[in-house]
Amino acid sequence: MAELDRLLAEHATWLAVERGVAANTLAAYRRDLAAYSAFLRHRGTVDVTHLTEADVDAYVEHLKSARNDDGNPRWSAASVARAVVAVRSFHRFCLTEGHVGADPAEDVVAPRVPQGIPKALTEPEVEALLGAVTGDGPAALRDRAILETLYAAGLRISELVGLDLGAVDLEEGFLRAFGKGAKERIVPVGHTATAAIEAWLPARATILARARRGGSDPDALFVNSRGGRLTRQGCWKIVSAYGMRAGLGGQLSPHVLRHSCATHMVDRGADLRVVQELLGHASVSTTQIYTKVTQSRLRAVYEAAHPRAKFKLPVPSGGRGA
């Protein structure tokens, strides 16, 4: 195995074992670093000890200048920034482990990513979505519990499908979620979501009792009709289907419910530090984007409601002496 390949493999192991990154994040790092490796091979610079800042800068410029068949940028600023994060992580690992004497990516700057405002449902839209689940069959009970929990706890989709039954304390109204980097946090659930989960549990037990042992997951809180743990794709389809049923369009995602939870809490006066803890953000600066959502809504309501919000003074027709 070439030295570069060996170090990339060691870096992947380090990310998984030492850093505890999620499987999807690890896969993204591997894809980005595989592209970086291919770029270096094409340039004939595969010796990690001889790489310079110019080599890394050249790769970043290569990503930024790449175009598709229509002449549009092949990679968004966010994709390039993510690739830079992966490359910097790899070179920092090589330096820390003593494989190289300097980090060529230390001063490389990623492109600035425009900070968008998260899309969020209005409170009536959330009510319509939750009201779209009808009936008391096993699927309806499960789906209602899923939607209520996503909105109540602001969970990521991976955190929701990863929930085990033992991670939920219905008596106290809390659950234990494992977020990015396998970081654990305790999240309040709320009475409505708690009641929805309690209603789902008997149906869950019936499904597991009928399921084949080999294909079932008795630890999972949310299971499919065969007793297996519900997948990210399965959860996405559930949310999208009820979004369509509620008249919200077929592109509704679980992450929109997470955004809606945070936005509505900030709208109602929740402290940013509390919302940060709820969402599992590493930095409060990530949570601060929800204040922009609130400000934009405030301006929209103000301009719609205040009689002089858009009032313009008439221009004098007679000049200074009028």
Image: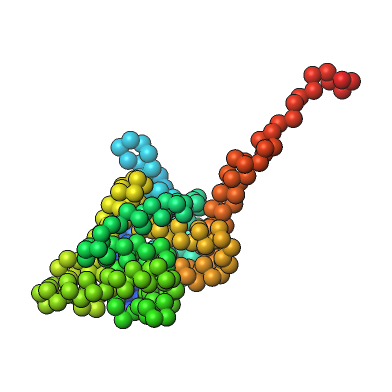
Q: Residue at x 76, y 24 (%)?
A: 315
| x then y, percent, for residue 208 | 17, 75
204 horizontally vs 32: left or right: left
Q: Nearer the viewer, residue 37 or 177?
A: 177
148 horizontally vs 204: left or right: right
Q: Name the colouring of the figure.
A: rainbow
| x then y, percent, for residue 70 | 33, 35
Q: Residue at x 83, y 18 (%)?
A: 318
40 horizontally vs 299: left or right: left
User: What is the count of numbered marks?
Assistant: 0
Write down the quadrant of residue 181 in the picture: bottom left
Task: Tell me if residue 245 comes above or below residue 54 in the rendering.
Answer: above
Write down the quadrant of residue 73 in the picture: top left
Q: Is residue 7 visible?
A: no
| x then y, percent, for residue 37 | 31, 60
Write down the quadrant of residue 180 in the picture: bottom left
Q: Nearer the viewer, residue 141 or 24?
A: 141
Quarter of the image containing the N terminus?
bottom left
Furthest residue in direction right, as rendered: 321
Q: Residue at x 20, y 76 (%)?
A: 205
Q: Is residue 246 visible?
A: yes
Furthest residue in direction top, as rendered: 318
| x then y, percent, for residue 62 | 39, 49
Q: Residue at x 31, y 73 (%)?
A: 198
Quarter of the image containing the C terminus?
top right
